[in-house]
Image: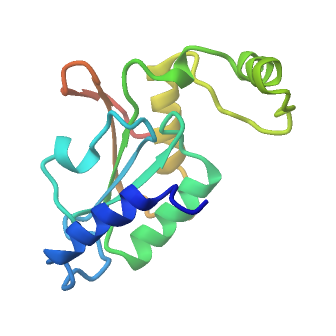
Amino acid sequence: MTGAFDDLLAANETYASTFSNAELTGRAARGLAVVTCMDSRIDPLGLLGLGAGDAKILRNAGARVTDDVLRTLVLAVYLLGVDRVLVMPHTDCRMSKSTDEQVHELIAAEHGIDTRSLEFQTVRDQEATLLHDVTRIMTSPFLPRDLTVGGAVYDVHTGRLRLVDTPRP
């Protein structure tokens, strides 16, 4: 592993030499949590006009509201100042181009690994999945009923965000 992260350590030295965020507290200064995909084309702070300390960013494959995302949102709401949540999947997502079974088969065929014990939570219908995930947050018994929750799809080709109507259950 020696040398594998040298580029990152060098970049960190440059970053640390002008670091100016020591006063940030860990609370979400803008009261926002964003659930988005791990896709490296997404810059959640930049595309929403936010800076360091403004929001909690939760990322996973497909921007899915998993049990771990719910656990993290409970902590963010009750301990870290979050009072609104935006669920933000994106266009051209790899998770919307295959079924779980196809992903299992691909990994087995190309890498010889049996991943069938994992749920990848692929996305057949992005908008329906977004509504499902927003509803999962809104109906969680662990989160406040008046928590503001919304959904939007980020277009990786234009940089634009499209709000999706997410009625309260």
Where is residue 121 shown, x and y percent of the image?
65, 32
Left or right position of 112 against 124: right
Does residue 123 show up? Answer: yes
Farthest front residue in view: 3
**Quadrant assignment, res 110:** top right
Question: Looking at the picture, does residue 14 appear above or below residue 63?
Answer: below
Q: Nearer the viewer, residue 42 or 14?
A: 14
Where is residue 23 shown, x and y percent of the image?
18, 85
Q: Nearer the viewer, residue 32 or 18?
A: 18
Q: Residue at x 53, y 49 (%)?
A: 139
Q: Nearer the viewer, residue 117 or 125?
A: 117
Where is residue 55 shown, x and y percent of the image?
28, 61
Where is residue 21 shown, x and y percent of the image?
18, 77
**Quadrant assignment, res 37:** top left
Q: Residue at x 27, y 71 (%)?
A: 13
Question: Looking at the picture, does residue 34 appear above or below residue 93?
Answer: below
Q: Nearer the viewer, residue 74 or 94?
A: 94
**Quadrant assignment, res 153:** top left
Q: Quadrant of the N terminus?
A: bottom right
Does residue 141 show up? Answer: no
Q: How many numbered circles does the render carry? A: 0
Q: Residue at x 47, y 61 (%)?
A: 73
Left or right position of 100 against 115: left
Left or right position of 128 against 146: right
Which scheme is used to colour this image of the protein?
A: rainbow
